[in-house]
Amino acid sequence: MIDRKHHPIDPWRLRENEFELENLAQSESLFALSNGHIGLRGNLDEGEPYAIPGTYLNSFYERRPLPYAEAGYGYPEQGQTLVDVTNGKLIRLMVDDSPFDIRYGELHSHERVLDFRSGILQRDADWTSPGGKRIKVRSRRLVSLTQRAIAAIEYVVEPVDQPARFVLQSELVANETQPQLSNDPRVAAALDSPLQAVSHDRDDEEIVLIHRTRSSDLLMAAGMSHEIESPGRIAVDIDVRDDWARTTIICELKPGQYLRVVKLLAYGWSSLRSETAIGDQVAAALAGARFSGWSGLVEQQKMFLDDFWDAADVEVHGHAELQQAVRFALFHVLQSGARAERRAIPSKGLTGAGYDGHTFWDTEGFVLPVLTYTMPDSAADALRWRHSILDQAKERAAALGLRGAAFPWRTIRGQECSAYWPAGTAAFHLNADIAEAVIRYHTATGDDQFIEDVGLELLVETARLWMSLGHHDRRGRWHIAGVTGPDEYSAVADDNVFTNLMASKNLRAAAEFAVLHPAKARALSVDAEEEAAWRDAASDVYIPYDEELGVHPQAEGFTGHAEWDFEASNGYPLMLHHPYFELYRKQVIKQADVMLATYWCGEHFTPEEKARNFDYYERLTVRDSSLSACVQAVMAAEVGHLDLAYDYAYEAALIDLLDLHHNTRDGLHMASLGGAWTALVAGFGGLRSREGKLCFNPALPAGMTQLAFSIRWRGARLRVEIRQDEVTYAVHNGADVEVTLTHAGEELTVTSAEPVTRPVERRKPLLPRPTQPPGREPLSALGGTLPA
Amino acid sequence: MIDRKHHPIDPWRLRENEFELENLAQSESLFALSNGHIGLRGNLDEGEPYAIPGTYLNSFYERRPLPYAEAGYGYPEQGQTLVDVTNGKLIRLMVDDSPFDIRYGELHSHERVLDFRSGILQRDADWTSPGGKRIKVRSRRLVSLTQRAIAAIEYVVEPVDQPARFVLQSELVANETQPQLSNDPRVAAALDSPLQAVSHDRDDEEIVLIHRTRSSDLLMAAGMSHEIESPGRIAVDIDVRDDWARTTIICELKPGQYLRVVKLLAYGWSSLRSETAIGDQVAAALAGARFSGWSGLVEQQKMFLDDFWDAADVEVHGHAELQQAVRFALFHVLQSGARAERRAIPSKGLTGAGYDGHTFWDTEGFVLPVLTYTMPDSAADALRWRHSILDQAKERAAALGLRGAAFPWRTIRGQECSAYWPAGTAAFHLNADIAEAVIRYHTATGDDQFIEDVGLELLVETARLWMSLGHHDRRGRWHIAGVTGPDEYSAVADDNVFTNLMASKNLRAAAEFAVLHPAKARALSVDAEEEAAWRDAASDVYIPYDEELGVHPQAEGFTGHAEWDFEASNGYPLMLHHPYFELYRKQVIKQADVMLATYWCGEHFTPEEKARNFDYYERLTVRDSSLSACVQAVMAAEVGHLDLAYDYAYEAALIDLLDLHHNTRDGLHMASLGGAWTALVAGFGGLRSREGKLCFNPALPAGMTQLAFSIRWRGARLRVEIRQDEVTYAVHNGADVEVTLTHAGEELTVTSAEPVTRPVERRKPLLPRPTQPPGREPLSALGGTLPA
């Protein structure tokens, strides 16, 4: 966990004003830069010390074997792992005879600042070398949001009180040593030096290294180009080998003089294009970046971010730490999706190789809700990526004996990479989550072309999957047996409430959109009989209900299971201390499941059912998953436990800053960071979209004086300002824009000319605030200083 | 499948009168010899050609890694694999310049005969070498049932029409080349040359090679000793290296002369004893065998088998093929258990290394019923082996967070080696099957000392396991959630009927025996409260029942699942063509589950329920497991489908002779062979033991004129002779022996002086003969020549 003393709260920046070697891995993730295409972990310029070196290109992966002691039909045999590509971040420095390494000599000060408005990571070091030369180093690093293939570093070094000789080595290095990822020698072999040298090229302007992965056969190029500024004589030397390239810059500086180097980096990769094409592509990107120059790149970055924040900012008054955290969260969600452009958004973004760099339902379920309302084109792109892997999803369905498309539980390139089917293959709800994201995006944007292009096909093929997964019983009720819902401490159960409701929604939407897009529907071989079958199954769906307890069992029979003995638990996360066998058969919940159903399919539950379900499941949920707190925040707010919702919003937002899951080192939890936005906007703002309508029902917890946020809705930028007792809806773009919404059930029309203010009703919970499993209470948002 | 033309039916022998290279692997299993301690596959004396070379010592295994692409808590990390130990079967022969290899030259005739009464495998070859010398070879091989460490071969060769020079090489060879068992290089590495040479020793009498396994650290010794008989000059040469030893015998023979070599083999192994001790043990065994000589060993073998058949023979009149098959089956079951002596009885016996040589519930469920009634001391020994691994079972339970003992689903040495928990760990019924075997053995023998020694502790520790697996619901019903029953096409379901009934029986028996053995119970810390809790849970057990269908669902909710689409099945066994996901969620059954419950816990079902359950499940059961046909035979007979029972009995008995599961090459299916006995004795004989009583209710199918069998019951040898319309019960050992039994509900007392004859009532089924899934009908026992 970062030490707050050294990370002062700042509303728009993440600052670290003292270097902490023990938190290096975490800080590498926190300070990661990305545009969704290139990802650079916050490794130090000089490369060492490091915890996990990381330079990633979205979807650039290597295959590896998936071993099974007892294999089964349909088990995937090949995994995919994000590759640490050629590192272009490296700028090593020699001061006289001493390498600049902050573990040696004396470090007078060291500060790193990630600015959410400029998109720049700045680092300042004041250091005396073991040889006694004091220097100042300032580096500024960006991954361009406007030039997708480009990252850039401005590196400035100066002597403080004595002249010194500086040798700066700016490098490209392929096949860096990695911490070992697996004990399996075959896996380790596949990922050891994954890049095979293809060629390298240099001219006066730039150096390009081209590599290829052994098994996945992907080609990549990394290029660098430098601008050098310094008084006096400079020598420049260039050395290029298969796996590395080095531009060496030598000069002598007196106090008052400085050496400034701008390093432009370009990356490109392809599974199709030739070596020449990839090399040219990188050279072109470098030429474009040189044309903009450092200052041009900085300016473009600022403009891009200004526009983003204008439509996306969330202001939290009364909680400076949460204010900072939610902007940190939004910034990283932006980075993960901004320029992913029909590539996957991994669960860690490009901030680390945790979970092998795979994409899960986190994207559609937790990241796309934010992007849909703040950067809708990115949400559309992410769904176009799903559409691009439809062939693999259809093949997977066919291999499983199912119809339609079965999207992979975890993947980079589209193939299923989950090696544990009860929590992978069986978690078919992923497909309905994709459908939900399609519906959500279309509702928020009205983008009919998207439906024509990809949306309808996604709905249709997932609907076909559900039809082959479900069946009618003798009484005409439609069931889905033997699947796994969101909660990963249950698996392979009948009639999971969430899955059944979501499948039903998926089927209904497929039928509705097929009717609206008849030509496209025909092209997909949908006919009226198929649409009717979808509607029938959707309306016949069976939703188990425990009459005695007045709650919905997570799946059939769940509420009859033995209760988990929390007092006897051996430690958390439970899955590291108890077998799946025990977890699955008892009432203990890793993450929101019925609660998520009451959020996403809220219209199927009465307020009393929501309150009772929340109360029941809150007592069973241990939040060993990072996908839980944000959902609990939303539903806690809806059922009136606003203070508890506050705690969960805080937990979701601070997950990585406080390293609450002890694995921020492997990358940031994009779903939880996205969920922080959801906790505030859907929780306290009460944002829902129901039957095409934009709905709000705001209420703030004690201690939060104001919550203001902007969202994008069908071309409008709507600002919602919630105070304890009233809320103002305003449109802040264009003159003739109007938004129709409901506030607490009342339909309103808001125009750019006329903001609307309405009172906020005090929310009263039906039941008292529930308790959590012992030891699993959320952190208090108010740190115990205000009444909870 | 063997070709019946070359395997003429013979009531007491398995004959192969023509060599079939394509069936070599199968015949190596069929002709395997074993005493439960040593196992020799039916490899040819000269070693080649071979399919799978195999020389096994019970429980002599090597460890190997169990790899997981996604590991989980409690997954076993080490597997165990039966090792092919030093091969002492080898006797190579050179005739002039040609090695005796039946693939070359001309084979005039070749016959192998396994005699079930002598226990000897005899081979006769009449062969002309490529060089034109015609010879006759006769070898006879036995694995001694009376001298546990000893196997012996009598090898006789003679020239037919010309003089020839013979060089006979009798060998011990360690680390034979094996067909590859795994694609995993780590596994292959662990099992490649598993034996490390420790030492070798020779003197005039014998040669001993000592080896050790690398990882499991087991020490073994193999020794050989020869008697040579030949006219004229003989030269003998001995050569010993680390991994092989060779005794070379050279002579010249004229027609009418022969060379006879008796090779005595001894094996020993230990995890504890020293190299010297193991070496001495083998030398002593050889000395003992030399003292008996070949003829002594042959005579002892015959005496042992005469006694066995006297108490165990089954006569089937009207079906010569089934008559042969059931004796073949009994002979192999005998071989698997005769001298196992507190070692495991693997699912393949010692006839092959299929399933890694592991022991499953097959032993208690399918093999011990036979041994209990035919060779009860062997059944006791097998249960004493279970008791010997109680510590590992307790450790496993503790690791899983459970109490009592959780016996391994598959193992050699006691540690869980199952790498797929839904069909391994979760199949806890294994523990109740062990309890059932304890109860069965005690009922049949009245052996109270066994209960004191090991039986009560097995019952108590398994009862404790069930108490931690089950729970009471709000209405006081006792459930077992999330476990896997016998049917492996379902898994991790709630309230599996079989498991719940068996657990209940286990608990009740633990309480009853604890009351009867109070001192032992106290020593096991059982008190009256614990006994009461066992009785309560047992009587509160919840048994799901589908009122609408009038059948018991295999587990809660089963009868509401979608039906399997048999027409669309891709092939059998289904698990090689469909994912577990699909199999588990649909109504399709690999092997008897509810049917087994109606057999083993028959008192819990009315005759009508049995009939309806049989009818319902028969239509869903594909018998992809070899543990099914015999149970279906028993229940088919009970519900009155005697012709169908006949078909299943035939299938169970012929499983390996006809290679019905296409894997006889890897070893014989001991459970099905044991099941053949059960199909006849419990099926047509109606043998049950209920509340301590021996019950019969016989009925024969059309075409079977008589079924006679002997069983052992509390010191008596009872012969039951069933004809179509009457049955005779007779005691045939001792003068004062009497047996009380019930015949069709009527209590009878049978003494050696007075056999009792009773009429057999014609059995009428409640429902018509059910159909099986298309294409999964059993073979017709009567081959379509008689009305089915």
Image (cartoon, coloured by chain):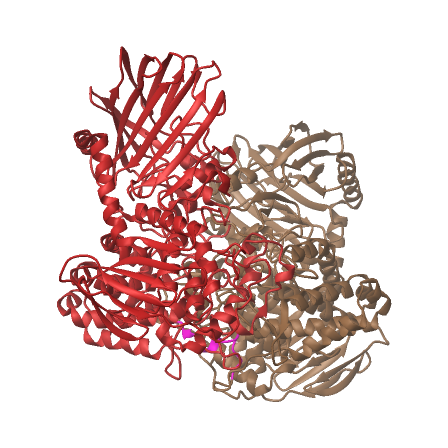
Chain colours: A red, B brown
Q: Where is residue A374 in the image (x, y as percent from the top left)?
A: 27, 55
Residue placed most toward the observer, B486 or A337: A337
Number of numbered discs visible in the structure rendering: 0
Q: Position of residue A173 (x, y in %)?
A: 35, 27
The residue that appears at 69% across and 36% down in the rendered structure is B230
Residue placed most toward the observer, A508 or B618: A508
A277 versus A723 height, above or below: above
Question: Is residue B696 visible from the viewing direction of this image?
Answer: yes
A220 versus A508 height, above or below: above
Q: Position of residue A259 (x, y in %)?
A: 30, 19
Confirm whether the magenta stretch covers residue B552: yes
B256 versus A75 height, above or below: above
Residue placed most toward the observer, A437 or B605: A437
Question: Is residue B116 visible from the viewing direction of this image?
Answer: no
Query: Can you tell which quarter of the image residue B347 is in?
Result: bottom right
Q: Position of residue B45 (x, y in %)?
A: 59, 42
The residue that appears at 23% across and 65% down in the rendered structure is A755
Q: Main secondary structure of the magenta part?
A: loop
A190 versus B241 height, above or below: below
Query: Can you tell which quarter of the image residue A249 is in?
Result: top left
B556 left or right of B461 in image: left
Residue placed most toward the observer, B156 or A160: A160
Magenta range is: B551-564
Confirm whether the magenta stretch covers residue B562: yes
A510 left or right of B716 in image: left
